[in-house]
Image: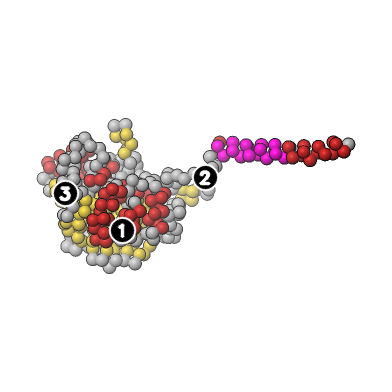
Amino acid sequence: MKKQNRLYPVLLGILLMLALTLAACQKQVSEETTGSTPTETTEAPSQTQEAGKTEKKDFFDKVFDTSEDAGRLTVRYLYTSTAFMMNGERVQCGDAVVYKSPEGKIMMVDCGNPAGFDEFDPQLQAMGIEKIDIFVMSHPHADHIGSFLKLAEKYPIGTVYYNGHEYASNTYQNAKAYVLEHNIPFILLKEGDSFKLGESVEVTVYNPEKGQTDDVSASYADANNGSIAMRVVYGDSSFWTAGDIYALAEERLIETYGDAIHCDIVKMNHHGNSTSNGKKFVEGMKPKAAIGLYEVIADKTVALRYSVKGALTFYNCQDGAIRIATNGDGKYDIQTQWIREIDYYGKPSADGHYTLE
């Protein structure tokens, strides 16, 4: 009996170990089959919350209300979300941004992919736009100029600026042919150039470098680093837009120009991807606000990089269309279309309205 009693603790220990092992195995199987293991994702959530099916508040009318535009530089980052299949390849939604001068002159920088026009056209109509005074092709990729023909056929365009890369794609060649056939001034922009939007908005060009795109092969698909980079200034207020430039071009600009290219409002380069928006660039620009245009949050690290440095950070996939207006005094009035559901890069305002000083 004494020998048997000594075996009980051993048997109990073995049984306990087996039970713990079995529980761990069951937990692992459950996580693998249900996907409950935490993972990072850049996919945008649905616009309704599954629990309770709560509809997203929509402040479209506030974003596109033009009653207070006069006397202010107003920039609207348009909402598009539809990807486009071209020759078997997926073309992302791309950029589409409208600048309105204090006098009412319109500059549009890029116009999304071929599917984007049906999404942003109602936004242009809501602004009462009848003509586009200046259109800037940041570079000839289909996610930036894909809707150009539809845009130009509906809205007369005064002047078109481009970066000089004679890309062989049908999208670019058809757009160029339209411009030339309709005798629209087609002007190459390069580092050191400048022009005005209306009477009081100054636009200075910092990229591409002189001659950078002149000899680029027509078949060379990666035109991103030759994107037109511009600083749009009204008084003490400043906005940055630079297409899809990569970190290499960013570093050159910071090293060459330093504080001269600082901008309060930055449209994230290359849709907020980690190919761009490097640490040196973000620290050098010191933005008060940053905007990413893409159908998802392209890179969580980039989102946090801007946010941690103190910039109000927005993504049109989460915030919808975004309006930023200024009197030229370095202060900004911001209105988003939606209240974001993902807030790791900043808590949203309850009514989508923000004030920056």
Q: Residue at x 12, y 41 (%)?
A: 181
Residue 171 position, x and y percent, is 22, 38
Residue 354: where, in percent of width, then height? Answer: 38, 62
Amino acid on which the number 1 mark rests in the picture: Met
Residue at the image point whose x is 16% and y is 54% from the top: 193
Q: Nearer the viewer, residue 113 or 260?
A: 260
In front: 109, or 133? 109
Q: Which residue is mark 1?
A: 285
Q: Which comes before the other along the chain, label 2 or label 3?
A: 2
Mark 2 lies on residue = 38
| Residue drawn 39% across the image and 54% down it | 305
Tags 1 and 3 touching, CB below 8 Å = no
Q: Position of residue 319 (x, y in %)?
A: 39, 53
Tag 3 residue = 210
Closer to the eye: label 1 or 2 = 1
Region rendered in magenta: 15-32
Does residue 26 show up magenta in the picture? yes
Q: Residues within 10 Å of mark 1 (few under 14, many from 20)?
A: some
Prevailing SS of the magenta stretch: helix
Residue mark closest to the camera, 2 vs 3: 3
Residue located farthest toward the left when viewing the structure as drawn: 183
Residue type pointed to by label 3: Lys
